[in-house]
Amino acid sequence: MTDQFKKEIDSALELINSYNNIYICSHIQPDGDSLGSIMALAMAIKKLKNKANINVIKVDDIPSVFDFLPNIDIIKEQDLSQEVELFIALDSSDKERLGIGAEFLCKAKAVINIDHHITNENFGDVNIVLPSSGSTCEIVYKLIKYMGIEMDKDIATCLYTGINTDTGRFMYSNTTYETHIIAAELIKTGIDTSDINISIYQNRTIERTRLLLESLNQLELYEDGKIGLVVVTQDMLEKTGAGMEDTEGIISFVMDINTIEAACLLKEVSNKEIKVSLRSKKYVNVSKIATKFGGGGHVRAAGFTIIGEQIDTAKEMILKEIFKNIR
Ligand code: 5GP
Ligand code: MN
């Protein structure tokens, strides 16, 4: 742990100790890391300060795959008219990604920003931003340990889920020896990793499976197969009976193709709103590309939204940028 990191944690602890009305929040389109980190931190602070009023803000629909997480129902829509003293943002690179949460942030007396995105805008009074960390849950683990809060199975299940999903089941290049050490410590608490993995990965509905097949069937390859692109349109959702949240995971099938360096998934949220996911294998910096379009993320995984263009135009715009980065 570096001195700078310790200093930031000490400042965060001071804020947590001085305020009672605490709001915890993460980004829209929640994933395992955002959900795992807010729930684990909420449960940990509750152990530290039993009397504290801890509110976990629901900013978007939660994919049903995470229903198994203990105490998932603590994530609730919150009342903006209540007093907000301390706001803690997790896994969110900027305020806009917090959705309705940003309005609670604006009201807060102090803001703690905990994240691992390289594109984080350091919008907090205290910023614990570690881009070298594979997941925000790893940072929360360190925080809990530093604060001397005892780890329990519920907290460990949430953290393990976030670490597991954000590192692509401990496979992506953001997986370090520390990731494995932390995972080992979490497993030591007695959590059922087999159960967790079945819940996350062997739980695909038939509609989601049909959408996966439908989209991969229309895979487009460019630059000798170095670039792979798939789209999910509203028509495809209707045909398969799947929802937009069922696009999760499609892009990793494109990444698995041997020739691929960069993969792109375009989701037609509506006629003129296209949500884009980017991934790369070895050298393309997709966070740089996403930033050009007003988004962000990591070097190997990033995203953004194009508003005001239809899917074909959006596709041309994005491909042009990816071409520039392919060798
Ligand atoms: P995904 O493609 O799975 O939605 O996101 C991949 C990564 O990029 C995640 O770390 C996510 O937080 C980040 N990301 C995705 N979309 C956006 C966006 O619109 N803005 C920013 N700043 N980051 C994004
Ligand atoms: Mn994350």
Image (cartoon, helix red, strand yellow):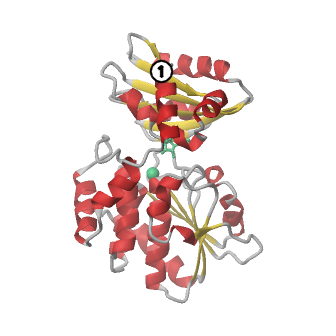
Q: Is residue 6 visible?
A: no
Res. 84 image quadrant: bottom right
In the image, 260: left or right of 45? left
Q: Position of residue 319 (x, y in %)?
A: 54, 18
Query: Does the beta carbon at disc 1 come under 8 Å from ligand 1?
Result: no
Which residue sits furthest top? 224
Using the image, determine if residue 109 lies above or below residue 279: below
Dividing the image into 4 quarters, which one contains the N terminus?
bottom left
Q: Is residue 235 visible?
A: yes
The kind of residue on which mark 1 rests is Asn
In the image, 296: left or right of 78? left
Picture residue at 52% right of the left edge, 32% below the top: 211
In the image, 31: left or right of 314? left
Dividing the image into 4 quarters, which one contains the C terminus?
top left
Q: Position of residue 6 (x, y in %)?
A: 37, 69
Q: Position of residue 182 (x, y in %)?
A: 27, 62
- Tally of numbered discs: 1
Q: Camera-side residue: 3 or 170?
A: 170
Q: Camera-side residue: 122 or 212?
A: 212
Using the image, determine if residue 154 lies above or below residue 295: below
Q: Disc 1 marks which residue?
A: 217
Which residue sits furthest right? 81
Picture residue at 50% right of the left edge, 73% below the top: 42
Picture residue at 71% right of the left edge, 78% below the top: 83
